[in-house]
Amino acid sequence: MSNFDKSIAKALGEEPEIGEFGDEQNILEQVTSSFRSRNRWLVVFGIVFGLVFMGLGIYSLLQFLELKETVQALPWAVLLIFSLVAIIAMKIWYWMELNKNAILREIVRLERRIEQLHEALSER
């Protein structure tokens, strides 16, 4: 291993101070940080969207269970399935948003590590 490789390994071995991006966030911290992001209105809209369709799904389920005739119950079953699909779509979108934010945090963490490595190597 050359001197250059040794200096890179030594610089990478030191833990830098990188502030709020230093620690992994648990799921509760990820959710609360999504409400502080630039697209918080979109997150709120998605949550409200999911709650509306959950209420619609519960209502259609109750209506579906009350009816004895198949022909009368069919529209309520279709509405129930549509509500469930809408809720699933909202949840998938939200988990993708959380994943995007986690990836952005990791990119910032890597950028800061590269800056510190560059500073450490330029001092030598």
Image (tube, rainbow, N blue to C red):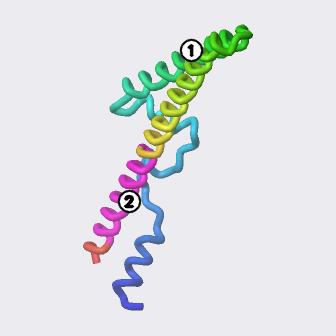
- Considering every residue shown, the one lying at the far bottom of the view is 1
Q: Nearer the viewer, residue 40 or 2?
A: 40
Position of 122 relative to 83 (above/below): below
Q: Secondary structure at mark 1?
A: helix
Answer whether residue 25 is visible to the viewer in this image.
yes
Residue 35 in magenta? no
Residue 107 in magenta? yes
Judge left or right: residue 77 versus residue 2.
Answer: right
Q: Secondary structure at mark 2?
A: helix
1 or 2: tag closer to the N-terminus: 1
Crowding at dot 2, Cα within 10 Å, few <14 / some 14-19 / many 20+, comes out as some
Position of 7 relative to 61 (above/below): below
The residue type indicated by label 2 comes to Leu
Q: Position of residue 115 (x, y in %)?
A: 30, 62
Q: Nearer the viewer, residue 86 or 33?
A: 86
Which residue is label 2 attached to? 110
Which residue is label 1 attached to? 56
> Which residue shows up at 53% across the image and 37% down it?
29
Position of 20 relative to 88 (above/below): below
Q: Position of residue 118 (x, y in %)?
A: 29, 69
Which residues, given as a range, are shown in magenta?
Answer: 101-120
Q: Nearer the viewer, residue 82 or 49?
A: 82
Q: Nearer the viewer, residue 124 or 23?
A: 23
Q: Main SS of the magenta segment?
A: helix
> Which residue shows up at 51% across the image and 50% down it?
23
